[in-house]
Amino acid sequence: MKIPLIYNLRSLRQRPVSTLTTAVGMALVVAVFVAMMALSNGFRAALVGTGSPDNAFVLRKGANAEMNSGLGRDVANVVGGMPFVAQDPQGRPMISAETFVVISASRRNGELANVVVRGVSPMALEVRKGVEIVEGRMFTPGASEILVGAKLPSRFADMAVGDVFRFAGRDWNVVGRFVAEGSAFESEIWGENEQFMPLFRGQVFQSVTFRMTDPSGFEGIEETMEGDPRLFVDVFREDAFYRNQSSLLGNLLQFFAIFVSGVMAIGAVFGAINTMYAAVASRGPEIGVLLTLGFTPRNVLGSFLVEAVLIALLGGLLGGLATLPINGLVTSTTNWDSFSELAFAFRVTPGLLLQGLIFAAVMGVVGGFLPARRAAKQPVAEALRGA
């Protein structure tokens, strides 16, 4: 026979101050945990979302990032003529040979930050799914025109459509702003590859991206291209490449989330222990009556554990609610692979909120076990005397 849950709820209502104090302590822990995990989730989503499983991504053999890759025009031409490169309705190969460089730009607060400048082919918007111009137009080949990612204008000066942005010793007209489903591309400047190549990298591209006719045949494409002596390249699925780029910093952010939350959880657990010990001390006669009525010590232990978990879940709920306003909030960090600023949004997901509740429940069990055990072990006579 179990002790009714209503008994625990009434007990919590009789101790509102201590209950809320303990719950708020746990809420702070859960809020920090969820917020830092949302930061990690947002960073991972921004990089992972940059790639498409339908695209192949080509770098010079041995290069692990665009920064240290270099591909000649002949390589881009050979790749563009291969049969596994998809074509658009006009029969043009869906391929974008790209330059990649990092420049210094002024934030609106006057500070400097690194920004990726990517030279793309006019086919780039077709090759890359989810990239869409939402303001202005596409740059004109041969003109000093650029597109800016959606997250740049609010953070950097002279990057609104219609502005003139200066870099590489030239003035560039900002003619369009694009979105890319929240990916890292939204933190980049795009222009024509033929305009950027002689300014930054001589006569080489840093990468080649193409749409595959049959993405399921990637292994064969990889084997063919990496075995071609004309190319000397490594080939990746585009989404896998960017997923690997996110792993180092994403794992580090996740580690800090768990470490910091774990340290804070120790304090919250001690708060729960004190609260539950006080409850046990003040409810000795109640415990004696429960034992007299035939409830076993195990029933008493379970009841007090449930009470501790209810307090913890209240804290977890409050902590989760406190993090909802940061969902979608844009922040930035340094992408260690390109040493450029990457803007991304906090991602507070239902799954993450559930993790916060589970984390709170675990704190409740740990904090409530010893007091619950003490309540269950009290002799009936001693408990009835209120000792």
Image: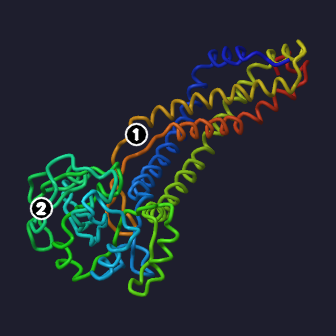
Q: Residue at left 42%, top 59%?
A: 54
* Residue type at numbered disc 2: Thr
Q: Quadrant of residue 94?
A: bottom left
Tell me: residue 172, above or below residue 346: below
Q: Residue at left 9%, top 55%?
A: 163
Residue 150 horizontal/vertical position (percent): 25, 50
Horizontal placement of 57 versus 107: left or right?
Answer: right
Tell me: residue 311, above or below residue 235: above
Instruction: Name the one closer to the observer, 79 or 159.
Output: 79
Q: Residue at left 18%, top 73%?
A: 194
* Residue type at numbered disc 1: Asn
Which disc, if any, is residue 140?
2
Circle 1 residue: 327
Horizontal placement of 1 versus 138: left or right?
Answer: right
Point out the image quarter for the C terminus: top right
Q: Quadrant of residue 8?
A: top right
Tell me: residue 121, above or below residue 156: below
Residue 7 horizontal/vertical position (percent): 72, 15
Which is nearer the N-term, disc 2 or disc 1? 2
Tell me: residue 122, above or below residue 328: below
Q: Residue furthest bottom?
A: 229
Instruction: Name the one closer to the observer, 118 or 305.
Output: 118
